[in-house]
Amino acid sequence: MAKKLNMRKRYELLTRGLGWETTYQPKEKVFPQETYEGIKITDWDKWEDPFRLTADAYWKYQAEKDKKLYAVIDSFSQNNGHLNLTNASYINALKVFIQGVSPLEYGAHRGFANLARQFSGEGAQIACQMQSIDELRHVQTQIHTLSHYNKHFSGLHDPFHMHDRAWYLSVPKSYFDDAHSAGPFEFITSISFAFEYILTNLLFVPFMSGAAHNGDMATVTFGFSAQSDESRHMTLGLEIIKFIVEQHEDNLEIVQGWIDKHFWRAYRVLGIVSAMQDYMLPDSPMSWKEAWEIYFVDNCGALFKDLARYGLRMPKFHEQATDEAEHLSHQIYTAFYQFSHAAAFHTEVPTKEKMDWLSEKYPNTFDKYYRPRWEMYAQMEKEGKRYFNMGLPQICQVCQVPMCFTEVSKGKPMDLSYRVSEFNGDKFHTCSDGCKEIFEHEPEKFAHAWLPPHQIFQGNCGGAEIPDVLKYYHFNPEDGGDYKGSTDEASWKAAHGIVDDENSTHEKSA
Ligand code: FE
Ligand code: ZN
């Protein structure tokens, strides 16, 4: 009878000796993307996957997780779980998630499938292939979970189409497109390390505890189901960085440059999360600033102390990101507030309770700079002049965020921050030193970025009027605007028997 093999042995059988040396074609032609970025790999066999997950164990774990998840979302659906949320305005956070994040999961699925093909090392191929399958599962479970909300609320009906076209979604889309259109080593440094290892906790932890705080057990469950994959992905991110740097001394400088670039790019994408966390959750478990302190300043500070022995240092401009922590969510949500007539989610002036919470969490900035602005907007609204910005904003050529950031690091938090570069006789605008450096390093790449406002002006987005553009985005009229007076609010009130009065929509249902 065959002896039962231990896990390590089975892992070796799965991941070693499967490749072959090429004979009738040169190896570079079989793996054409492996060398052009300048990364030198001398021995792929030094690659160790710390998880040593075999295929049979993988399918077993994932099937168990799916069984649990689908049992929860079935019962959530049958019991009309959406009625137990804090408030229907919470759904706006879910809209941002499925429009902005879920398509990135699909992008990661494609990207890792490509890496599994392009890397010639078998251990790395297996790890990338499993991550590719994980990412496909993530996007599927997210769509299945949120489809329940789509039956009752607006803005959730066509997230992938929206992601490809809408102005605010070009922020996450262009980040992933940047990684996809780079070589395989830059892609993995970007997505596995800069995004997943350094910054993913800032997305998932507050989002999932935010869901729990607001009564959304369905979302909590898909979050947990993805989280165990996430720890595997984070380990891949860390291991690949160490592996590349250890393979050849020439690799260090290239990798550090990618860490600098993709940290800044991923951080700019997370500006959307900061707004969601501080403003769109009726009940926020922690502020953006608190999360930044824990997950970036403390955790990543310790990580890079550890990585110093490989010659790696903290990403460039991290000090600026930390300086901005007290301003970021306020600036981004203000942009959302002004432009939500052209978005597929609703915004509103924060409630009194929310403003008090923001004062408490942002003692140095909120009362001084941002509360007066919200009070002005509230006053305008009272006078029947709810403010929507009818112009099109200048956006950053690199991160594609509207120019709403300020010179925080220069001690001038009320001065708009923008930089100008020239390339081939044209002017290009960026939002910060970080984005300017990225532009100037690869101007030929970023010069032809697809910028939504420019495209609208050129007539490439359905027409010249706002309704034409919204149609092109597949936004319905009820998807955008203020939460007050929205169909979401109306159906929430009807389901809970709430009679109109100023504050009642923000009370928890009994
Ligand atoms: Fe994922
Ligand atoms: Zn930028």
Image (tube, rainbow, N blue to C red):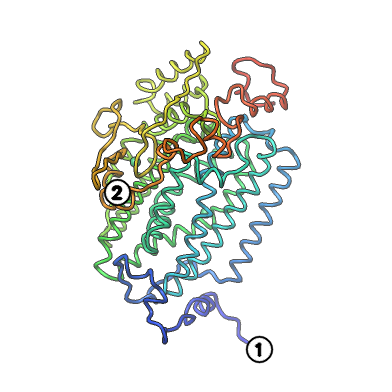
Q: Secondary structure at mark 2?
A: helix
Q: Is residue 322 above or below residue 414?
A: below
Q: Amino acid at mark 1?
A: Met
Q: Is residue 290 visible?
A: no
Q: Name the residue located 39 percent from the left edge and 24 percent from the top edge.
A: 366
Q: Amino acid at mark 2?
A: Ile
Q: Which residue is mark 1?
A: 1
Considering every residue shown, the one lying at the far top of the view is 383
Q: Nearer the viewer's eye, disc 2 or disc 1?
A: 2
Q: CA distance from mark 2 to mark 1?
A: 61 Å
- Disc 2 CB within 8 Å of nearest ligand 2 atom: no
Considering every residue shown, the one lying at the far bottom of the view is 1
Q: Is residue 406 above or below residue 113?
A: above
Local crowd at mark 2 within 10 Å, few (<14), some, or many (≥20)? many
Q: Is residue 145 found left or right of 267 in the rendered image?
A: right
Q: Secondary structure at mark 1?
A: loop
Q: Is residue 183 visible?
A: yes
Sequence order check: which comes first, mark 2 or mark 1?
A: 1
Q: Is residue 446 found left or right of 392 in the rendered image?
A: left
Q: Name the residue located 47 percent from the left edge and 27 percent from the top edge.
A: 337
Toward which corner of the image does residue 180 lie, by quadrant? bottom left
Quadrant including the N terminus: bottom right
Q: Which residue is mark 2?
A: 438
Q: Are marks 2 and 1 in contact (CB under 8 Å)?
A: no
